[in-house]
Image (spheres, rainbow, N blue to C red):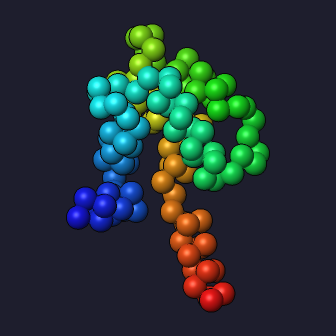
Amino acid sequence: MEYVAALSLVMRGKMEHKLRWYFKLYDVDGNGCIDRYELLNIIKAIRAINGNDNQDSTAEEFTNRVFDRIDVNGDGELSLEEFVEGARSDGDFMEVMMKSLDLRHIMAMIHSRRHSV
């Protein structure tokens, strides 16, 4: 049931709800903040799934840029508020967040495999 609810949110939910859900997903250790290591691993996973084509920076450089731009208090962790506001104000970060759970390419792969069998 949780999976269906999450899928519904990702596909049709409001941006605020999506960003809050992404934050919970990316806060791997559940401490209420996303640190550089957690974000770096997410960025690497997103790039592995979506491909590394047309990347202007490494995952490490992108992670550092995100923290430079949206870690308002400079504590090396992103709070929920920093994450949500940062995604809203930083187009590059928002694009990556939206791509992280974009299921269109997965659906296309499933569709093509069904028709090839």
Q: Which quarter of the image is occupied by the C terminus? A: bottom right
In this picture, residue 96 sits left or right of residue 52:
left
The quadrant holding residue 3 is bottom left
Give the total of numbered labels: 0
In the rendered image, is residue 80 in sight? Answer: no
The quadrant holding residue 95 is top right
The image shows residue 116, relative to residue 4, as above or below, that is below
In this picture, residue 45 sits left or right of residue 14:
right
- At 76% from the left edge and 45% from the top edge, which residue is drawn? 54
The image shows residue 13, relative to residue 40, as above or below, that is below
In this picture, residue 7 sits left or right of residue 36:
left
The image shows residue 75, relative to residue 1, as above or below, that is above
- At 75% from the left edge and 35% from the top edge, which residue is drawn? 56
- At 33% from the left edge and 45% from the top edge, which residue is drawn? 21
- At 66% from the left edge and 87% from the top edge, which residue is drawn? 116
In the rendered image, is residue 62 in sight? Answer: yes
Residue 16 pos. (x, y %): 33, 44
Residue 12 pos. (x, y %): 36, 62
Residue at the front extreme, as displayed: 117
Residue 50 pos. (x, y %): 63, 53
Q: Which quarter of the image is occupied by the N terminus? A: bottom left
Residue 9 pos. (x, y %): 33, 58
Residue at the left extreme, as displayed: 1
